[in-house]
């Protein structure tokens, strides 16, 4: 099996998702080649062939020229899978490449199971296992779903490619930071997050008291924000903030991939959950299996005595 990994620069730097592509391909036991529109001075650490498009010609983004380079690499490698990160670059390019190749596209993959791809459905509450119906497929990987295990390394063998067309389509004009409204959780050392397991809005102050006793900030999972129990600026996850505190306390949070992708780099994770099989147990350093509210109240009371 062969995979073509589409590496990406964002603002002149390789993105973190590049290493996840390599780990995912290792999980598929695929022989890998890569393609990058970039510079020879900043290549992914990767053993194998790397097709390099010149960023000075193709620019950091331009759908036609980038797709042109990727399709040339695909023609040379004839891969079974062409793999992108599920981020704006991949969202825009993957369907263009899939349509040109008349290949199936599977988006936002969160896991692998017996040769099938796991993708979320029903707002992340359920998982589907799917298999492409075409011999070749274009895949996008949910960011954070395949964390880098540190196995990749090496220096790629570079082959330069030049675009065959002129790329008359849209060009990237630049990036504009989203305006920051309210709280920035990214620098917090302690975060205590409330999940749906909190049960009702009236219970939020109990979790807030624990956060205060630990001199931390409050975070939240998406259902808590959607229910209006806490403001969106406190949401942690794929569509919220990405945090890496010293201590993360997850209160009644199951550990859906979209939540984990925002907090999995926390140094120490405590999860309080009545379900010992909750997915958060896979990354928690300490799992407290209990009914949440009485435990949090008792813990806060003890902390206040210190
Ligand atoms: C495109 C997309 C983007 C998303 N972005 C985000 C995001 O940024 N952040 C995010 O958080 N989610 C996000 N989600 C939603 C995500 O898929 C999950 O639905 C969500 O994270 C689940 O939140 P939860 O863990 O609080 O709730 P649930 O999954 O319902 O889990 C509740 C947990 O509480 C436990 N529990 C219940 N009662 C008690 C009790 N009395 N005592 C102890 N434990 C109890 C349960 O065992 C369960 O594990 C996104 C989904 C999609 C599709």
Image: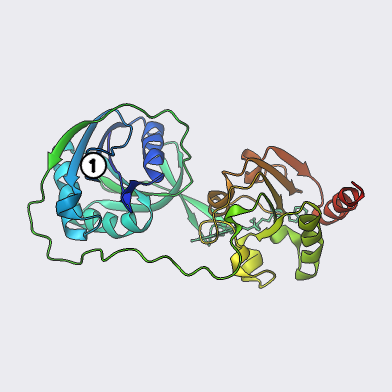
Residue 249 location, x and y as percent? 71, 49
Which of the two residues, 274 or 300, is positioned nearer the viewer here? 300
In the depicted structure, whether residue 187 falls above or below residue 83: below
Quadrant containing the N terminus is top left
In the depicted structure, whether residue 305 falls above or below residue 217: above
- Residue at image position (22%, 54%) is 97
Q: Is residue 230 left or right of residue 52?
A: right
Could you say which quadrant of the image residue 115 lies in?
top left
Q: Is residue 230 left or right of residue 31?
A: right
Which of the two residues, 189 or 31, is positioned nearer the viewer here? 189
Residue 232 location, x and y as percent? 60, 68
Coloring scheme used: rainbow
Q: Is residue 269 left or right of residue 52?
A: right
Secondary element at image label 1: strand
- Residue at image position (60%, 53%) is 187
- Residue at image position (51%, 57%) is 238
**Residue that numbered label 1 is attached to:** 35
Residue 131 location, x and y as percent? 37, 46
* Ligand 1 occupies quarter: bottom right
Could you say which quadrant of the image residue 124 lies in?
bottom right
Residue labelled 1 has its Cβ within 8 Å of some atom of ligand 1 = no
Q: Residues within 10 Å of mark 1 (few under 14, many from 20)?
A: many
Which of the two residues, 214 or 107, is positioned nearer the viewer here? 214
Q: Is residue 67 visible?
A: no
């Amino acid at each position: 099996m062969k995979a073509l990994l589409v590496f990406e620069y964002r603002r002149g730097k390789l993105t973190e998702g590049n290493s996840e592509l390599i780990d995912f391909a290792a999980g598929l036991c695929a022989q890998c080649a890569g393609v990058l529109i970039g510079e020879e001075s900043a290549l992914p650490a990767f053993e194998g062939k790397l097709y390099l498009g010149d960023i000075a010609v193709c620019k950091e983004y331009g759908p036609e020229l980038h797709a042109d380079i990727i399709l040339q690499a695909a023609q040379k490698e004839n891969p079974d899978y062409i793999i992108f990160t599920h981020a704006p670059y991949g969202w825009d390019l993957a369907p263009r490449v899939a349509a040109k190749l008349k290949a199936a596209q599977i988006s936002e993959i969160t896991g692998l199971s017996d040769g099938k791809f796991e993708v979320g459905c029903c707002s992340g509450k359920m998982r589907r296992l799917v298999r492409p119906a075409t011999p070749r497929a274009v895949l996008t990987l949910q960011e954070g779903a395949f964390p880098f295990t540190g196995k990749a390394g090496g220096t790629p063998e570079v082959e330069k490619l030049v675009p065959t067309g002129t790329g008359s389509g849209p060009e990237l004009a630049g990036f504009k930071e989203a305006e920051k409204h309210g709280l920035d959780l990214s620098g917090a050392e302690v975060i205590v997050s409330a999940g749906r397991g909190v049960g009702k809005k009236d219970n939020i102050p109990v979790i807030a008291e624990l956060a205060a006793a630990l001199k931390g900030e409050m975070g939240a999972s998406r259902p808590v924000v959607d229910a209006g129990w806490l403001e969106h600026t406190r949401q942690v996850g794929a569509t919220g903030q990405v945090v890496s505190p010293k201590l993360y306390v997850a209160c009644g949070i199951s550990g859906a991939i979209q939540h984990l992708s925002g907090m999995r780099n926390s140094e120490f994770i405590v999860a309080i959950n009545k379900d010992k099989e909750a997915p958060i147990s896979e990354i928690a350093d300490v799992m407290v299996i209990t009914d949440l509210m009485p435990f949090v109240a008792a813990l806060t009371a003890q902390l206040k005595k210190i």
